[in-house]
Image (spheres, helix red, strand yellow):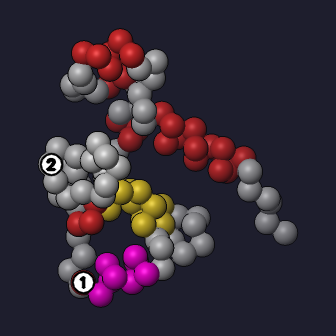
Amino acid sequence: EGRFFFPDPLLLEEIERQNLVAIRYVDDLGSVTEDYPFNPSNSPRGIIAITSPNGRHLACMLHPERLFQKWQWPWMPEKWKIALEASPWLKFFQNAIEWCNNQKPAQ
């Protein structure tokens, strides 16, 4: 697992100040976590992805493309195998497509 690394703590503070954190690991209660297994890479402040200030670039330290189909998961609870129609990671890509389709062309 990749993880974000901030050798300069001021860089991390600036990223958060500018609201550039796009995705974070959370626990079952929705709280940001650095704890395994919710945050498998121990990324600081649960950060998975950051974006550029204009939102056009995303740096992501996980690989949702490896998990967007249920059969790609190395393990999942038996209840999920039955209950889930699709991997929750599929929504990651559906949201990206929806966002792109709603953008106005540059003038």
- Seen at 39% across and 83% down, the residue is 14
Q: Is residue 38 above or below residue 74?
A: below
Answer left or right for 49 relative to 92.
Answer: left
Residue position marked by numbered label 1 in the rendering: 9
Residue 13 appears anywhere in the view: yes
Dot 1 crowding, Cα within 10 Å, few <14, some 14–19, many 20+: few
On the image, the x and y values in percent for residue 101 come to: 72, 47
Where's the C terminus, which quadrant? bottom right
Magenta span: predominant SS is helix
Dot 2: element: loop
Quarter where residue 67 is shown: top left
Q: Amino acid at mark 1?
A: Pro
Quarter where residue 34 is shown: bottom left
Q: Is residue 76 above or below residue 54?
A: above
Give, as a single range, the part of the protein colored magenta.
10-17
Residue 36 tag number: 2
Dot 1: element: helix
On the image, the x and y values in percent for residue 63 come to: 34, 44
Give yes or no for contact between labels 2 and 1 (Cβ–Cβ under 8 Å).
no
